[in-house]
Amino acid sequence: MITAGIDVGIENIKVVVLRDGTVIASGTARSGGAGRGKAIEQTWTDTLKAAGISATDITKVVATGQGKGDVPFANDSITEPLADARVALFLYPAARSVVDVGADQIRVVSLDEHGAITEVVLNQKCAAGIGTFLRTVARRLGYTLDEMSRIGGSSDNRVVVNDACCVFAELDAINLLHDGVAWQDIARAIHRAMAVRINSVLSDKVRPAKDTTVLIGGVARNPTLIAALEERSGINFMIPDQPEFAGALGAALDAAA
Amino acid sequence: MGIQRWEIRPLEVWAKAKEMRAKWQQSIDDAEKEHVLLAQGNCNWAVGFPALRVIEDNPVGAMMGYRSSQFSRECRAAGEILGWGREICGYQLNCWGAMYLGYQMDGSKFPMRDMVVPFPDPCDQHTKRGQAPMDYSNIPRWQGDSPLYTGPHDPERDATMIENKVGTTLDIIADIERIYGQIFDDEKFIESINLAHRVREYAAEVCLSMQHIPAPLSQKDLYSFYTLGGLTKTDPEETVELWRMLRDEVKWRVDNNIAAVGTERYRWIEAHPPPWYFLRYYRYMEKYGAICIGSQYSHMMGGPFEFKEDGSWGPRVPLNSWGERPIKTREDALRAMFGDDARGHNFKVDEVIRPYAICEFAKAYKADGAIMPLWRGGVGCTVTRKEQGLRLSEIGVRVLHYEGSQPGDRTDQDETRLLDMLDVWMESQGLRKLED
């Protein structure tokens, strides 16, 4: 059976095609803002082409993500925590928590021993701690996300920027630059500030366990952030190879269920 | 498996409630014309004065938020221009703003207050409500204490606190008699307190009926009725009659399994409503077969409640026990009005009790979940809200927090995000929409 999942996020669209539990193709593209409909269609078409199949070969398509209602060809949609739970248990059967840090949201999903969701915690409505925060500061500093992560990772200095507010953090970064603080130290401070905010969501209700927590979402590709978050939270995260595709994979798994 | 569907039917007593509410509003608008004094505040004893009516910022501020987002925004802007911050309760900023603008939502002249009577309350904002009218038009203001203590329940301390309130109120009544030359009618006051107790008994029965599955009323019904006799001081005898009619109809609905939500399969409690313009949030939850069976706030008219030794949930003061303590004097009536316990008498009073009290409430009404907003304004509202969430989680009640300004203020309300959060919350508990 071939199923597909499509995760329409604020920043990116991700598609995963699954045949009998194995990923046969995946594709991603920018969400396209006002042109999101076209971007969804294009990503879908490109991914099917890469898989060497047509839409009629697919038994079921499930959408997830903030834009899940904008996928006209989806047979069903699920909310993001369900997709998170599906993928975490598929990749790591022992998982008891999933932390998904995307462009616009931090989610913590707690699972019981049977895989049922027992709690979901979302971040408060604030830019600090989400992927968009990193992108904003990177843009201000003139880096790409990958560059800022790499540069930050090379620092062992512990200068501090505001961890409560994205705007203040950005201003702090600029002030530090004016004070002659090294770029890499500022980049590291930014990642640490973000880790503080993510950790506050982890502490909100049910604290994720040290060794059974999965980290997914685009931010989980950032090694400097992961290091800062593991240091701050004391959690050794389990991270899949392509954490940004986790939501789409979870939706594809749901379609196959 | 098919979905259980209950019969639904509109409330017949609703028309009477609307009529009474309109009459109350007219009595406020006509106060000046009828040479009746208008007091800012909320007190049951005003009925003892022949020419004194009371008006509170709630439900007026809530109604403004519900009916006209534009007007309530103009009102809040008028307040902000004069320096009031956005942490001020939306209800009172709506009302203060209308006072500053000089007109009401329908364009009619704002009924200026002649005095401020106390509304002592643990919520800092309630206590502050009289400040702006007093400063704006140089009218007298009386203020009372809202005593609190922490630690174990102490009846001796309670009694002292009650006597403090009684003494303060006696002084205020005497002041008003002296200053305005109105003679306080003790007989009328005593009668109104006796009638108020009958309202409480009927209201308690209505609240207890919400334990029934399917719930006979919705949270919107509860909010609407509790203002009549609670926040708006309508004719005491008419108020008793309204609550009797409601009790009878609700009893009939319970006996015949008439539901507020025909597909009830999930019951939740809430700490507060969303900003009033956004009541469709209740309808949205109905798509999941979910019903809000109330809040401690909307059950306030019948309270306080407690678990009895036999495990049942009931009023702390037994129903029909009023005649055991006859009210003969003004002091007796005031004592009865303030209740028996200073502490824990009202869910709002005690920050230590709050998180545990809401757990009892959730258990009593078989709640599956709780929606607990975090407000930026009306600071007292949100005190202990996160602690309440944690305690509820511990007893297996799933909790959703969302953010906003305050029910009277839509400024920080994010509709899309809230609806998304409701979907996430419901689906993560294994529920999907029954319809769309």
Image (tube, coloured by chain):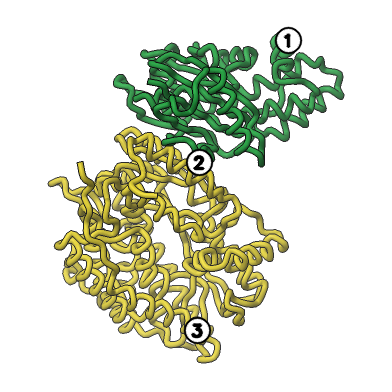
Chain colours: A green, B yellow
Question: Which residue is at a point 33% across and 33% down the rendered structure image?
Answer: B394
In the displayed structure image, the side of residue B257 where residue A131 appears, left or right: right
Mark yes or no: residue A130 visible.
no
Q: Crowdedness of circle 2 by 10 Å Cα count: few (<14), some, many (20+)?
A: some
Q: Is residue B92 above or below residue A54?
A: below
Q: CA distance from mark 3 to mark 1?
A: 77 Å
Give me the residue at 38% from left, 56% from top: B297
Category of crowding for the residue at label 3, using alpha-carbon neighbours closer than 10 angstroms: few (below 14), some (14–19), many (at least 20): few
On the picture, is A64 further left or further right than B112? Answer: left
Q: Is residue A174 above or below residue B82?
A: above
Q: Which SS class for mark 1?
A: loop
Q: Which residue is mark 3?
A: B178
Identity, as a three-letter code, of the amino acid under mark 1: Ser
User: In the orientation shown, which residue stands out farthest toward the left?
Assistant: B310
Q: Nearer the viewer, mark 3 or mark 2?
A: 2
In the picture, the disc for residue A69 is 2
Q: Type of residue at label 2?
A: Gly
Q: Nearer the viewer, residue B395 or A37?
A: A37
State which chain disc 2 sits on.
Answer: A
Q: Which residue is mark 1?
A: A155
Amino acid under label 3?
Arg
At 58% from the left and 63% from the top, the residue drawn is: B69
Q: Give the label on residue B241, or none.
A: none
Q: Position of residue A111 (x, y in %)?
A: 36, 24
Q: Nearer the viewer, mark 3 or mark 1?
A: 1
